[in-house]
Image (cartoon, rainbow, N blue to C red):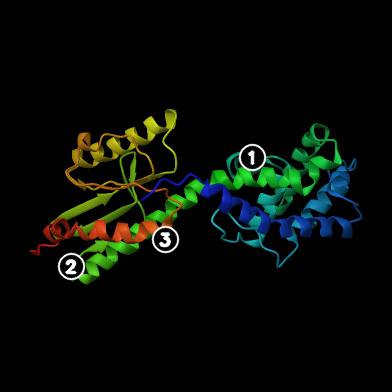
Amino acid sequence: MNFVLQNLRLKELVAIVQENKKFYEDFISFLESEGYSNIRQFIQEPLDDRAVETISRYLKRKSEVKLYDGILRPYSNSKAKWYFLAWLLRDAATQRLQPLLKSIPGKSHVERKAYLINEVRKFVAPLFPHDENWEWSAISEVMLARLEGSRRALKGTLFEQLVRRNIRNVISNHNFSLEVSNKEVRLHDETYDVQVTGARGSILFPVKTRETMGGGHALLFTRDIFKSILVAAENGYTCVPIVIAESWTGDLDALESETYIYIQANPNQIAEIEPVLSQELEKLVPLLAEIAEQSK
């Protein structure tokens, strides 16, 4: 495949952020119904009680407007509002705020969330005192950064499903008596995205994807692949790493695995990658036959 000069990830994310503008506009409509003329006026609210009540009503409010994650899947209504308020206040709902809820006062989950969001609001208010800090152009940049971070994990899950589906197709086409795991498998401190098990053993498939290969993360990416193979071998498993990267500089010949799949492509090219992946997995038929006690 040819190298992709365009930033496909950015193009996809910008399109998703634009879809999420409707959610932002819906929030403004809600604030107007609460007596606020704009977001900044709400952020600068001097009365704690009024702010907490407003946040509580928003968290409980049902809406048909969707907030989408980094691969265009809609969040649930409650999660969407929680995430949106955190992003609005330049914070991280899952990584930072969620653990804090355990020590926050309140009789219900909504009360604790409202209390915490209000505390964050009061802290953030003097840091962003201008109207333009709360307009769509500013919030869209925050949302873009948040979605980009979550998208990496979501894309990883997407490729797990892609590999799992295509392995099942190969197994079905050859009538092998093999079982494919429905979720990742943990072996000591390593995780393997797909496991195929037969009467005579198992094959572990770590699926590694990367859009760029520059900087220190490139070394960590390669080290992660080597470690996955090593831990599997030490525990008596066959390991077949699947690497999808546009410009991986790792030494394929140095891998402690006789079999591997390397697809030199940008992971955003899913439509182009899947047929290549299917062909590469078909080459594993002798290995699959071996653990299924069948000859090919």
Judged by depth in the image, the label closer to the viewer, 2 or 3, is: 3
Above or below, comparing residue 72 to residue 38 in the picture: below
Q: Position of residue 149 (x, y in %)?
A: 55, 43
Front residue of 179 and 252: 252
- Taking the image as shown, residue 285 lies to the left or right of residue 228, namely left
Name the residue that disc number 2 marks: 176
Between 125 and 14, the residue placed more toward the observer is: 14
Q: Which residue is mark 3?
A: 271
- The residues tagged by marks 2 and 1 sit, at their Cα atoms, a distance apart of 49 Å
Q: Is disc 3 placed on a helix, strand or loop?
A: helix
For the image, the number of numbered tags is: 3
Whether residue 146 is visible, yes or no, is yes
* Label whose residue precedes the other's in the sequence (2 or 3): 2
Q: Residues within 10 Å of mark 3 (few under 14, many from 20)?
A: few
Q: Quadrant of the C terminus?
A: bottom left
Q: Position of residue 114 (x, y in %)?
A: 75, 48
Q: CA distance from mark 1 to mark 3?
A: 41 Å
Crowd tier of the residue under label 2, counting other residues whose Cα lies within 10 Å: few below 14, some 14–19, many 20 or above = some
- Badge 1 is on which residue? 100
**SS for dot 1:** helix
